[in-house]
Amino acid sequence: MSEAKPWSMAKVVTASSAGTAFEWYDFFIFGALASTIGQVFFAGLGETAGVIAALGLFAAGFAFRPLGAIIFGAMGDRVGRKATFLTTVSLMGGATFAIGLLPTYATAGIIAPILLIILRICQGTALGGEYGGAAIYVAEHADDDKRGAATGWIQSSAAFGLIAALLVIYFTRTAIGEEAFLDWGWRVPFLVSVLLLLISVWMRLKLSESPAFRQLQEAGEVTKTPLREAFAEKESLKQVLTAFFGFMAAQGALWYCAFFYVQVFLERNLGVPGAEVNWIILTVTVVSAPLYVFFGWLSDKVGRKPVMVGGMVLGLVAFWPGFHAITEAVNPRLAAAQEATPAVIETDLATCSVQFDLIGKAEFTSPCDIASKTLSAKGIGYTKVASDDGSTAVRLGEERVVVTDNGDAIAPALEAAGYPLSADPAEIDHATLYFWLIVFTVAATALYGPQAAALVEMFPTRTRYTAMSLPYHIGTGWVGGFLPVTAFAIVAATGNIYAGLWYPIFFIALSIICALLFWKERHGQPLH
C-alpha cells in the first residue's frame, strides 16, 4: 500500500488546531451554560443548588483530564498520534452532540442528570488526550527552528474555542429569546457541534502519521510499556516532575487566574453585570489569540525558558497591584465605602469554618460562616474579632447588625453604610480595567505560547505522548481547576478579598524557582 502523501505544514497546523479548537468549544459551552444546565437537569435541587451542581459537574471535566492523559497518552505512544487524536476528537464530539439530545429532568427525572454526568466524564477524558496528540503531531512535523511558532497555533486554539462558544450562545439567545432558549434553545450550541465534528474528522483523516513516530515503527522501537518507561524510570520521572513544577503548575494558576478567576472577581466581588463581564473577557480573549503564536515564535529566537519565565515573573508582580487597581477602576464606591466604614465580624471565633467546598455540597451554617460568606460573596473585606457574649454581629461603623440564620439583615445595613449593590457601568474606568487585563493576558500567553514546544522537547519520541500529557493536565486541570474554590475559601477565612491571589502567586513563585534550578533549555535541537 502506498504511503499517504504528507501535507504541508500549513495543512498540518490547520487540521490539528481546528480539531483542538473544536474540542475546547465543546468544553467551554458547558461552562458558559452552567446556569441553564442547572435549571434543565438539576431542577429537583432548586435553583441555587442546581447551578452549584452544574458548576461541580463542569469541574468534574477537569478532574478526569489526567485520566484521559494516561489512557490516550499510552495509546498515542503504542498505536500512533493520528489514530489517537482521531479517537479523542470523535469521543468529545459524540458526547457533546449527545448532550443536546438528552431528556430533561422534567421529562426523565433522575435519569437525565445521570446521563449528563456520564457524558461529561467522556468529555473530560477525551480532552485529556487531545492536547498532547495535537501538540506532538505538529511539533514532530515542524522544522527544529520553527517549532515554537508552529505549536503556538495549538495554544491559540483554546482562545478560538472560547470565542466560538460565546458567540454561538449569544446569537442563539438573541435570535430566539430567553424563554425559548431555556425551553429548547440551549440544545442548539451542543447540536451545532456535529458540523464542527465532521469537519475536524475529515481534515484529520487526510493527515498521515507523524514522521518521528513512523521512524519508530520502521525501526521496530515502538514502546510496549509507555507508562512504566514514562513514570517508573528515574530520568523520565525527573523530567515529568520538572515539567510540572518548572512551568505547568504556574501555567494552571496563571492562565486560569487571568481568564477565569478574574471573571468571578468582576462579577461576584465587584458587582459587574454578567453580560458585561462576558464581553470584557471576550474582548481580552480575542486580543490573546495572536499572542500565543507571537510568543511561540519569539521562543524560537531566544529560547523557551526566557520567554516563559518572563511571563511567570510578569504575572507574579502584576496580580496583586493589578487586582487592587481593577477594584478602584470598576467599583470606586465599594473601595471608598471599605475605607470609610470597614466591616468587622464580632463572633465566637471557634464557630468559624474554613469554607473549602470543592463539590458544592458542604453546608456552612454557623452565624460566623453566614456572615463571612455573605460579605465575601459581595466582595467586601472584613476582620474578625471575638465577641463578648459569643453572639455574632456585623459592625459597620456605629451600626451593629446581629446575624440571624440566613443573614438577610446584612444587605440593607451595607446599603445604608454606603456600600453599592453593584458596580455602576457609567463609573467604570475601562482604560485602567483593560490595561491590567492585557497585562495579565501578556503574562499568560508568554507562558502558554511556547509551552507545547517546551513539553515536546523534554521527552523522547517513544514516551512523549504519555510523559508530557500527565503533567500538563494535572497543572491545568487540577491546579487551575481548583483555583476558584480554593481562592474563595482563602477569602472567606481571611476576610481579605485579595487574599485568594496567594494561591496563584504561590504556584507561580514555586515554578520560577524550579525552572531556574532544574529546567534545561532545548529549543532548536532535533527531537530525536
Image (cartoon, grey):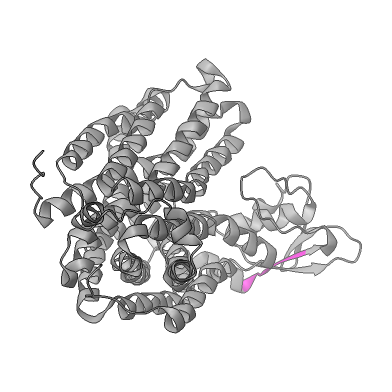
Q: Residue at 33% across / 78% down in the picture?
A: 305
The span picked out in magenta is 340-345
Q: Residue at 40% across / 78% down in the picture?
A: 519
Q: Is residue 423 visible?
A: no
Residue 117: percent from left, percent from top: 51, 33
Q: Nearer the viewer, residue 5 or 472?
A: 5
Lateral position of residue 485 relative to residue 23, left or right:
right
Residue found at the very far top of the displayed protein: 107
Q: Residue at 90% across / 66% down in the picture?
A: 388
Q: Does the stretch in magenta take in 342?
A: yes
Q: Establish if 295 lies above or below 257.
A: below
Residue 457: percent from left, percent from top: 30, 68
Residue 32: percent from left, percent from top: 41, 43
Q: Is residue 316 visible?
A: yes
| The N terminus - image quarter | top left
Q: Nearer the viewer, residue 49 or 240?
A: 240
Quarter occupied by residue 470: bottom left
| The C terminus - image quarter | bottom left
Disc tally is 0
Residue 259: percent from left, percent from top: 40, 59
Q: Establish if 363 lies above or below 97.
A: below
Q: Does the stretch in magenta take in 3?
A: no
Q: Establish if 378 lies above or below 335.
A: above
Residue found at the very far front of the displayed protein: 220
Residue found at the very far right of the displayed protein: 389
Q: Residue at 18% across / 70% down in the picture?
A: 144
Residue found at the very far bottom of the displayed protein: 517
